[in-house]
Amino acid sequence: MTHPILVTGAAGGTQGSTGRLVASLLLEQGIPVRALVHKLDARSDGLRRQGAEVVEGDLLNPASAQSAVRNVKRAYFTYPVADGLLEAATIFAAAARDAGLELVVNNSQFQGTPDDPAFRDPRYAPSFRNLQHRLADRIFDWAQVGVVHLQAPPYYENVRALVSRSVAERSTAFLPWGEDTTVIPLVGAEDVAHVAAALLANPGTPSQGVYPLVSETPTVKGLMEALGRAIGRPIRYVPITDEQWANRVKERINPHALDHLTHLWQYFRKGNEHFRATDAIRVVTGRDPQTLEDFFRSNAEFMNAAGQ
């Protein structure tokens, strides 16, 4: 492969960091990677040591996007849960079209199943952020850049971030998820990255344009039981209101993400039994997806050290 694969969000963030994972997976296969990072720091230095071509840029800057896609045929697009998704997607789609990209793997959000009103009608999107993803998906479709959408629910890593402190300190999870029968669809960021890397590394054309990625659909009770088994002690679930939860996390989560998650919890609390695990991860990668319990087990240190 003579052209590098462009990976946006390559430095990684505080939770899923799929861009960083995708870049590493491609580099491990000897595939050239152009890593687009928002700023140069220790994380970008690490990518450079792995062999990536590191480029500093901003997805909200058309000149940055145009420069990043130069001499590129394939790219991974991801954007943090923050303001600017639609602008960034439009800028990147336009640059990708002008550069003649043949494949863009777009890290999108899960949009329900055909028997869910939210799937059929954008007016029922779980949150404004989710609606933005639906619109961004269409922008990429219209750009005709061979886009493939990875539609994923919350990551295991999101759950870890939400509960690690209270579980470490009090063996309790305080969350606005309503009854313990509420179903929470989940997937591991590592599996999302493996799907993206497999699609980007394969010289052929992906067999479909949308891959819904859902590894597990536990109830809140099942989720807490899996966490308890993984770390070796029972975990208590205490339901709290949206307002109580917002007050707990507002210093750690930006307003855009806070609004998105608050509405997402409300959507899950409605009792959407239609959620089902999908086989896309196994089909694309040839490997079974990581289980939630295995994820908790491999991240037990976050749940056992007070103050994390």
Image (spheres, rainbow, N blue to C red):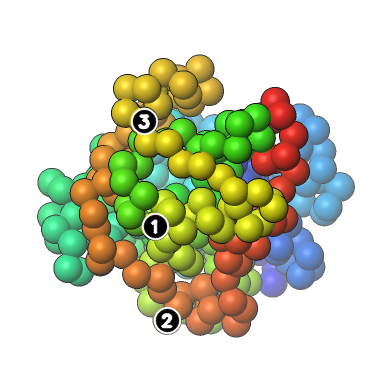
The amino acid type found where label 1 is placed reads Thr
Q: Is 78 placed above or below 4 here? A: above
Name the quadrant of the N terminus: bottom right
Q: How many marks?
A: 3
- Structural distance between the alpha carbons of marks 1 and 3: 16 Å
Which residue is at a point 75% across and 43% down the rendered structure image? 301
Disc 2: which residue: 207
Question: Pointers 1 and 3 in contact (CB under 8 A)?
Answer: no
The amino acid type found where label 2 is placed reads Ser
Left or right side of 28 for 127 = left
Disc 3: which residue: 240
Which circle's residue, 1 or 3, is located before the other in the chain?
1
Q: Residues within 10 Å of mark 2 (few under 14, many from 20)?
A: few
Left or right side of 187 for 28 = right
The amino acid type found where label 3 is placed reads Ile
Disc 1: which residue: 219
Q: How crowded is mark 3: few (under 14 residues within 10 Å), some or many (20 or more)?
A: some
Which residue is at a point 43% across and 54% down the rendered structure image? 221
- Structural distance between the alpha carbons of marks 2 and 3: 43 Å
Which circle's residue, 1 or 2, is located before the other in the chain?
2
Instruction: Please tell me which residue lies in front, 123 or 295.
Output: 295
